[in-house]
Amino acid sequence: MNDSKQTVHATVLGYPRIGADRELKRAVEAHWSGRLDEAGLEAAAAAIRSQMLDDLASAGLDSVPTGVFSLYDHVLDTVVAVDALAPRHRRESETAAYFAAARGDAEAAPLEMTKWFDTNYHYLVPEIGPGTAFRARPGKALAEYREAVGRGLNARPVLLGPVSFLLLAKASDDAPIGFEPLDRIGDLVPVYAEILSALAEAGAEWVQLDEPALCADRGAVELEAVRTAYERLSSIAELLVTGGYGPFGESLPVLLESGVQGLALDLVRGGVDVDVLESLNVSRETFISAGVVDGRNIWRTDLLAAAAELERLHRLTDRLGVSSSCSLLHVPVDLDAETELPSSLTERLAFARQKLREVVSLAEADAPRLQRPPAPDDWHSETVRARLDALPEDADRRVDYAERVAAQDELPPLPTTTIGSFPQTAELRRARAAHRRGLMIDADYHARMKAEVAAVIAEQEKLGVDVLVHGEPERNDMVQYFAEQLTGFATTAAGWVQSYGSRCVRPPILYADVVRTGPMTVEWTSYAQSLTDKPVKGMLTGPVTILAWSFVRDDQPLADTAEQVALALRDEVADLEAAGTAIIQVDEPALRELLPLRRDGRAAYAAWATRAFRIATSGVKPETAIHTHLCYSEFGDVIDAIAELDADVTSIEASRSKMEVLADLDRADYRRGVGPGVWDIHSPRVPSVEEMAASLRLAVAAVDPRRIWVNPDCGLKTRRYEEVRPALANMVEAARLVRSELA
């Protein structure tokens, strides 16, 4: 990108696309509700892109990424760019087709959704078959490139690379057994070549192709696909190939041999790639971008250490860049919006706009700014550390599963329940906001929340649900709620990041040792139980998920931090049990999320992650049932870890994937309770009784019916009561129907 031996090229690999104040969320949700037409939606999108370009331009970057904006998901954008929409999603309006694939509609179910590598971002899974007719549709990439060029910027279009696109896809339902989407690489590469040619003709000097799938272990067939793709594509345009989620490893020499002109290395998690480069005969004309600014966490960069990495790479190439380790999609926009955090913490933080300045400082070798972050205050608790040292090594429940189940309350076959939350209405959100701002006194706030709990309990009893929940009206978020009650955490006012589509979350900042100062959930669960004779589940978020969905301190191993969180949850579990709660659900939807991409790190991760869960849950009596919940993951990768959690019941996402996970459970000889979701709550569709019953029939054909629970895929907080009531009614009726068939 820059041929000068004296300068370092400054850029980032992507940027937050939700807007500094979540403008994207409001625009797309207004469109979905019919309050904003397609022209209004595009105008709102253009304004957000303009602000993104303002941020990138004002920072002084040498080039800016374009095409990184998305109305919902960049993988879905790639589906559109290669014209691979499934037939069921094609509509007269392109926008309607796009959102039909993302969310489903009255005519069709959406694409499956799962986690983007080891992050909390969710992507939509392309469906590719032997008959998928790829066609180049470069319109979005060209339009956004021209937007930036029109402002006088050195723009670099960004696309998801062809190998990662196919590796992230699944075989379509009509594909024959044995077919893999990667089999289509020879058909897809010419389409990418056409898109690259269009961008080159429009004036793009470089194109960035993101290949994050190459940060995982890859075999001979996959590496040959890399070679096939990049020998062809590197002859069309100057390519910057990125990984972003760890080292390229075995893919690195293949990329170099294929003629790729530039590589962006993740030096936060993939520093071993520099060792590989030093052992290879790398052309000094190869552009190497050093990803030394963390794109996934919010701690300030040690600029002196980063400068040393740049110096090391300078010995290998005459064309050096500095960038974020991956797209800044995973961090909030601006630290300056946080006025309530303590200064001792903010001086150690950097959000997206601040990370832009770090990149430029490193490129300019600005000596006054090349400093280390200040050392943290004393963030340690000797009491917590002593308690952890006193825990037994195994931290297991002392009675095995079969004996526990025999001791627990008997329920009807195929018992029905929900995952925990009920709709977070606008009225509830206003009440929480008023209380937070001091506009509603404690007594009025508690009365409002209790009224909602009573309404949720009555609703479930009316519908005939077997195991109830209190609905979590008091919780703004399943992690933030606990972070606000545990020492060692700080919460932000505007630290929003995209989870999927219009869904944004504010990850707390876990910066110090974690201590529970008192019960966090007992009051609400006990009140709900007082209103019904049916069992009410206690609802907690597990230690691994609290870590995964927070920005976590980087001064000690994750395993140590997980055990501290687990110890706080262990005390809460004990208090719930003492209050008479017979079923306690400790959710771990992020268990798969933190799994290392490479196999050599997985055993150690599974050991500490499952131990943390057992620390939190192993102190109860056999009569107390421990449930957990996992969602939107490739469960086959963590089946053994799921068993090691030793929960009595595990509820899992299964509706979008059509119960495929049950085959993984069967292969792993999993013999505990399981609740495969029969209703996809991330879509506004209300599935029929027969649709849910069909899913249940698949489940009982694969798993002993005595171990099956019936539930949605996930919590209901993002849905409206107009959807929840009929869907839950259908779910209960489907369970009754299949029960009668089993009888």
Image: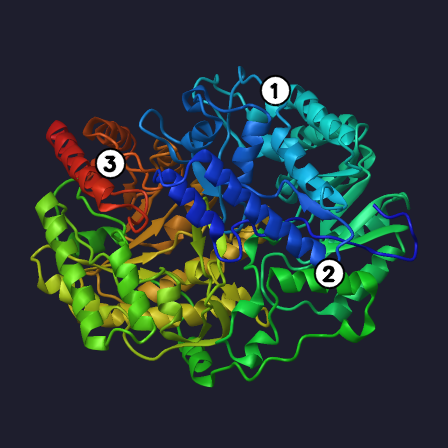
Q: Which secondary structure, mark 1?
A: loop
- At 51% from the left and 38% from the top, the residue drawn is 42
Q: CA distance from mark 2 to mark 3?
A: 56 Å
- At 26% from the left and 60% from the top, the residue drawn is 428
Horizontally, residue 739 falls left or right of residue 394, namely: left
Residue carrying label 1: 135
Position of residue 227 relative to residue 215, above or below, is above
Q: CA distance from mark 3 to mark 1?
A: 46 Å
Horizontally, residue 655 falls left or right of residue 525, namely: right
The disc labelled 1 sits on which kind of residue? Arg
Residue carrying label 2: 359
**Closer to the N terminus: mark 3 or mark 1?**
1
- At 10% from the left and 49% from the top, the residue drawn is 461
Question: Which mark's residue is nearer the viewer, 2 or 3?
Answer: 2
Pointer 2 local density, CA inside 10 Å: few below 14, some 14–19, many at least 20: many
Residue sticking out furthest to the top: 131
Residue sticking out furthest to the left: 533
Residue 96 in picture, x, y percent from top left = 43, 29
State whether residue 325 appears in this view.
no
Q: Which secondary structure, mark 3?
A: loop
